[in-house]
Image (spheres, rainbow, N blue to C red):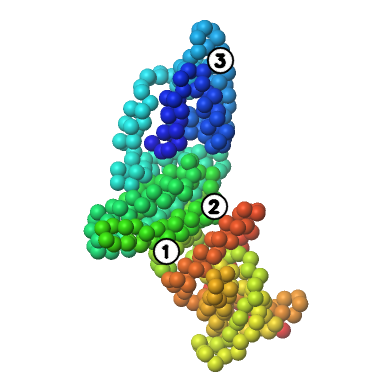
C-alpha cells in the first residue's frame, strides 16, 4: 500500500463523525489535485475508474450520502453510501462483500508486492501493464514504459556481498518511488531490473523522469559496513503507439533501448528508435570551433569558427562559409555549459548549399562512449525538460550515416 492509500485510510479513521469523512477527503482532493478522485475509489472500492468517471461518481456519491442520511434520520458512513450507490444507483458492483479495508489492502500486498524492494512484483507489473494498455488503446492516449537496470550489479554482490546488494536495490527503489507520480507503477521486473509504467505519458516526458532517476541514483552514497557504495543505472524508454502497437512489442522496444544504453557506455537513458540510423535532435544555435583534419585525424589542421544549428547524440548540423568534402574528419568543440568545451570527433555525412551562399554541414560523431556520451545525453535531456516547461519541444531527425552528393556549385 503506497503513501496515498495510507493517507486516505488514516483520514477516514481519524474522523469522529461519519459526516466528516467526505469533507476530510475533499480537503485531500484540494491538496493533491483531481487525480486523487481515482485513488480514493481504488482504495475504498477497488474500482479502477478513469479520472473523469471518478470525479463524476464522487460528486454523485456525496449527494447520495446526504439523501440517504436524511432518509434514515442519522448520519451514515461514506462506505455505506458508496456501497448503496454502486450496487443500486450506478451498478458497478453487483454482489458487494464487507471486509475490513486494512486487512484487504494487506492481503493484496501479500499477492502483489516484492518484499525486498517494496515495489510491485513481476505478476503485478504484467497485470497493470495489460490494464493500462487497454485504457490507452480505448482512449487513444499514450503509454510509456521505462526499463531500468543497475550497472555492474554483479560487481557489488561479488565485492561487498549479497546483503550490500539488497541494500543497494532498496535504496534505488526508494529513489524511484520518491520521483514517480502517484499514477505510475514501479515494479521489480527481475533481478536488478525495474520497470515503470507511465499512463498518459509520451516517450519524451518519460525520458525526463528516467534522467531524473538516473541523476539521483548517480548522486546517492550508500553506506554498508565501513564501505561507501556508488551505483549507476541505465534506462531504456519506449511508448505506445509511436514505438509499438502491442504490449509484447512495447516491452521488447523498451528492452532494446536499455540494451542500447548499456552498449553506449552505461549510466545513460536511451530512447527506443525503430530506425537505428536515426537520432532525435534539438536546436543548438551556438558558436563552434571546427578543425578540419582531412580524411584521417590530423593535429596539424585548419581551424575556424562556425554557427551550430542542431545537435543530437549521434551528430551535429552547423553552417559553414565553404563546402567541406563528404567523409572529411572534423574535430568540433562545443560548449554545453559544463565549465569547459566538449571535444567531439566526427565525419561529414551531409553537405547542402543554402540560398545565402553558405553550406549546411552534417557531421556524424565517431565512436563516442562513456563520459562524453553521458555528458551529451544529459545535456539533451535537460533541454527537453526546459523546453517542455515553456512549450512542447520541437523535435527533429538527423540521419547519422546518410551520405549526400557534392553540393551544387
| Among the two numbered marks 3 and 2 on one chain, the one whose residue lies closer to the N terminus | 3
Q: Nearer the viewer, residue 37 or 229?
A: 229
Where does residue 308 sit, x and y in percent of width and height? Answer: 64, 73
Name the residue tied to disc 1.
267
Q: Dividing the picture into quarters, in which one does residue 141 lie? A: top right
Q: CA distance from mark 3 to mark 2?
A: 42 Å
Label number found at residue 205 = 2
Residue 321 located left or right of residue 82: right
Between circles 3 and 2, the one closer to the viewer is: 3
Name the residue tied to disc 3.
66
Residue furthest to the bottom in view is: 300
Q: Which part of the image, by quadrant, shows the C terminus?
A: bottom right
Disc 1 element: loop
Badge 3: few (under 14), some or many (20 or more) residues near its Cα, within 10 Å? Answer: some
Q: Which part of the image, by quadrant, shows the N terminus?
A: top left
Q: CA distance from mark 1 to mark 2?
A: 19 Å
Q: Nearer the viewer, residue 174 or 185?
A: 174
Can residue 359 be spotted in the picture?
Answer: yes
| Among the two numbered marks 1 and 3 on one chain, the one whose residue lies closer to the N terminus | 3
Residue 256 located left or right of residue 169: right
Residue furthest to the right in view is: 356
Q: Nearer the viewer, residue 170 or 345?
A: 170
Q: CA distance from mark 1 to mark 3?
A: 56 Å
Q: Dividing the picture into quarters, in which one does residue 225 lie? A: bottom left
The residue at 25%/64% (across/down) is 159
Amino acid at each position: 500500500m503506497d503513501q496515498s492509500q495510507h493517507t486516505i485510510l488514516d483520514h477516514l479513521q481519524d474522523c469522529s463523525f461519519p459526516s466528516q469523512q467526505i469533507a476530510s477527503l475533499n480537503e485531500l482532493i484540494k491538496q493533491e489535485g483531481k487525480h486523487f478522485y481515482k485513488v480514493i475509489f481504488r482504495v475504498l472500492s477497488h474500482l479502477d475508474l478513469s479520472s473523469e468517471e471518478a470525479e463524476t461518481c464522487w460528486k454523485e456519491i456525496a449527494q447520495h450520502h446526504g439523501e440517504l442520511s436524511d432518509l434514515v434520520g442519522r448520519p451514515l458512513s461514506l462506505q455505506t453510501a458508496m456501497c448503496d450507490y454502486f450496487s443500486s444507483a450506478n451498478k458497478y458492483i453487483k454482489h458487494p462483500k464487507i471486509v475490513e479495508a486494512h486487512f484487504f489492502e494487506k492481503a493484496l500486498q501479500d499477492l502483489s508486492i516484492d518484499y525486498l524492494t517494496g515495489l510491485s512484483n513481476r505478476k503485478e507489473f504484467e497485470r497493470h501493464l495489460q490494464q493500462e494498455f487497454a485504457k490507452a488503446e480505448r482512449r487513444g492516449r499514450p503509454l510509456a514504459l521505462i526499463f531500468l537496470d543497475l550497472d555492474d550489479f554483479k560487481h557489488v554482490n561479488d565485492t561487498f556481498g549479497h546483503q550490500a546488494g539488497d541494500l543497494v536495490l532498496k535504496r534505488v527503489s526508494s529513489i524511484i518511488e520518491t520521483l514517480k507520480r502517484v499514477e505510475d507503477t514501479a515494479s521489480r521486473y527481475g533481478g536488478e531490473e525495474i520497470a515503470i509504467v507511465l499512463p498518459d505519458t509520451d516517450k519524451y516526458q518519460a525520458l525526463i523522469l528516467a534522467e531524473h532517476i538516473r541523476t539521483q541514483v548517480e548522486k546517492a552514497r550508500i553506506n554498508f559496513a565501513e564501505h561507501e557504495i556508488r551505483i549507476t543505472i541505465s534506462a531504456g524508454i519506449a511508448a505506445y503507439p509511436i514505438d509499438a502497437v502491442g504490449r509484447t512489442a512495447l516491452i521488447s522496444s523498451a528492452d532494446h533501448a536499455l540494451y542500447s544504453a548499456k552498449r553506449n557506455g552505461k549510466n545513460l537513458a536511451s530512447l527506443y528508435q525503430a530506425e537505428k540510423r536515426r537520432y532525435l535532435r534539438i536546436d543548438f544555435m551556438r558558436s563552434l570551433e571546427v578543425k578540419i583534419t582531412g580524411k584521417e585525424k590530423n593535429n596539424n589542421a585548419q581551424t575556424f569558427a562556425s554557427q551550430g544549428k542542431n545537435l543530437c547524440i549521434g551528430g551535429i548540423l552547423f553552417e559553414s562559409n565553404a563546402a567541406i568534402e563528404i567523409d572529411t574528419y572534423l574535430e568540433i568543440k562545443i560548449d554545453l555549459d559544463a565549465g569547459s568545451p566538449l571535444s567531439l570527433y566526427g565525419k561529414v555525412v551531409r553537405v547542402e548549399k543554402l540560398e545565402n551562399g553558405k553550406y549546411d554541414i552534417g557531421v556524424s560523431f565517431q565512436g563516442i562512449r562513456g563520459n562524453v556520451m553521458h555528458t551529451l545525453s544529459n545535456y539533451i535531456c535537460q533541454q527537453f525538460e526546459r523546453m517542455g516547461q515553456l512549450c512542447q519541444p520541437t523535435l527533429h531527425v538527423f540521419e547519422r550515416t546518410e551520405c549526400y552528393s557534392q553540393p551544387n556549385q
